[in-house]
């Protein structure tokens, strides 16, 4: 097992990893920007190093500074969390060059799954269902239009190196296609430094369902069931739950088998998530694989009793998985709400500032993962996520009731948050019936936003 781990991240995920390391008897090293000096993750770690000014490009995304901190601290491994450099193949390779274990998959697996067009080609060869579309990136507007005519409108134009809902546009007819292609390429180039795009069929009212997989260095691969992630705004997940109200035992088995094939196709090691779109007829299609721990991993932990972060660390240290597929049991229902420092009443504008009051909810079945406390400053430079509330119940009805209670108890002052939006969503009958899809929130709840 490792003696010391550097967490190359901030906020609630850094706190989460620090706590997992402490339970494993591992010393932790935090890194922080000048803006984050008084952050909770810095206070909880055994050591902490400043890695640069507030902008992420000069701190959390600056690989030389991270490696310098890791070298000074004498760490055995680096945990990247999620976001920032978590899915950066170059960072994983640099860690390897410096003799530092990267707690995640190989650079090759990250690169293959990170380039969406290559991931699609790999999945097709592995027999994993993909959404109809181009076999790879398109070289011209003419080629894109030919493919669109062949598979039928509407279509999606997607960044080949995309992620997080960026570089995606919808074209419902030929007239919209040219502008959609140009717009997607511009955003892809600006966001990922790669303007390549591909085309795929736009599914009407699909659900977003993902399968959690874990794989060790000894050839063992298992799945831990599915998560429902269809409550989204601008392709950003807001509420997740496990299991999915739309997945029965047969569909779960078929999706899980496809997810295991996907992981095996790239010799995957560590925690990963294979994401699918599911249409109204129960057909499912691969869209991407996230080669890291997910924001929503706590709902899987709640229904399986397995600590995914500790399992990640053990795997990276060379230990075999502590369980086999037959050991995985699903118990109850879990729901997670992402608490963002945003104002849902004012076009979801970010709400940075000082948190003047912070009282987390508790009671049976409630877990809060947060990276802040009273007096913390929510910075304008980073993602707006400040906490996650997870509610577990014996069934979905009880999980929803506990989440409603927790959100009512949560006291946050000094900043605006998305808590009021979640209370509104949970009260809606269509949500309570599980009748949602990826555009449900925007079309049915946020029609004026």
Image (cartoon, helix red, strand yellow):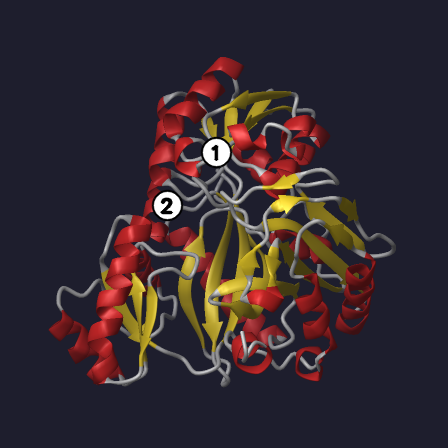
In the rendering, at what x and y percent does residue 93 appear? Answer: 35, 32
Residue at 40% across, 65% down: 287
- In depth, the one of 176 and 412 nearer the eye is 412
Image quadrant where residue 124 sits: bottom left
The dot on residue 54 is 1
The dot on residue 195 is none
Q: How many marks?
A: 2
The dot on residue 109 is 2
Let me know if residue 197 appears in the view: yes
3D distance between C-alphas at marks 1 and 2: 31 Å
In the rendering, at what x and y percent does residue 103 appear? Answer: 50, 35
Which callout, 1 or 2, points to the residue nearer the camera?
1
Left or right: 102 in relation to 153: right
**Up/down of 310 relative to 386, above or below:** above
Residue at 26% across, 66% down: 183
Q: Earlier in the sequence, mark 1 or mark 2?
A: 1
Image quadrant where residue 335 sits: bottom right
Residue at 45% across, 42% down: 84
């Amino acid at each position: 097992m490792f003696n010391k781990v550097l967490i190359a991240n901030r906020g609630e995920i850094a706190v989460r990893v620090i706590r997992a390391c402490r339970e494993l008897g591992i010393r932790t090293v935090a890194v922080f920007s000048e803006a984050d000096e008084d952050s909770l993750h810095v206070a909880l770690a055994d050591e902490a190093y400043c890695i640069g000014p507030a902008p992420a490009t000069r701190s959390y995304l600056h690989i030389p500074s991270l490696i310098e901190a890791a070298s000074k601290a004498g760490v055995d491994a680096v945990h990247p969390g999620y976001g920032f450099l978590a899915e950066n193949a170059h960072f994983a390779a640099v860690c390897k060059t410096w003799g530092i274990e990267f707690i995640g998959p190989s650079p090759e697996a990250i690169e293959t799954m990170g380039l969406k067009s290559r991931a699609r080609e790999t999945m097709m060869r592995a027999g994993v269902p993909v959404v109809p579309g181009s076999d790879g990136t398109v070289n011209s507007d003419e080629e894109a239009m030919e493919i669109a005519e062949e598979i039928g409108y509407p279509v999606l134009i997607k960044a080949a190196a995309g992620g997080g809902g960026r570089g995606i546009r919808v074209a419902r007819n030929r007239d919209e296609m040219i502008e959609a292609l140009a717009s997607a390429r511009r955003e892809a180039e600006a966001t990922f430094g790669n303007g390549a795009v591909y085309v795929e069929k736009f599914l009407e009212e699909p659900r977003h369902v993902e399968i959690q997989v874990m794989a060790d260095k000894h050839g063992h691969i298992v799945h831990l069931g599915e998560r429902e992630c269809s409550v989204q705004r601008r392709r950003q997940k807001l509420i997740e739950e496990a299991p999915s109200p739309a997945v029965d035992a047969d569909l779960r088995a078929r999706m899980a088998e496809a997810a295991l094939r996907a992981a095996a196709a790239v010799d995957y090691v560590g925690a990963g998530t294979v994401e699918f779109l599911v249409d109204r007829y129960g057909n499912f299609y691969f869209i991407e694989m996230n080669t890291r721990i997910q924001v929503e991993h706590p709902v899987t932990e709640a229904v399986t009793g397995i600590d995914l972060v500790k399992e990640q660390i053990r795997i990276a240290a060379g230990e075999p998985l502590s369980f086999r597929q037959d050991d995985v049991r699903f118990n109850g229902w879990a729901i997670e709400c992402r608490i963002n420092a945003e104002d849902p009443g004012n076009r979801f504008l970010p709400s940075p500032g000082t948190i003047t009051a912070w009282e987390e909810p508790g009671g049976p079945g409630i877990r809060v993962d947060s990276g802040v406390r009273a007096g913390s400053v929510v910075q304008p430079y980073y993602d707006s996520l400040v906490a996650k509330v997870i509610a577990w119940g014996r069934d979905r009805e009880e999980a929803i009731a506990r989440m409603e209670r927790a959100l009512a108890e949560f006291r946050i002052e000094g900043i605006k948050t998305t808590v009021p939006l979640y209370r509104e969503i949970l009260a809606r009958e269509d949500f309570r019936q599980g009748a949602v899809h990826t555009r449900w929130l925007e079309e049915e709840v946020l029609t004026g936003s």
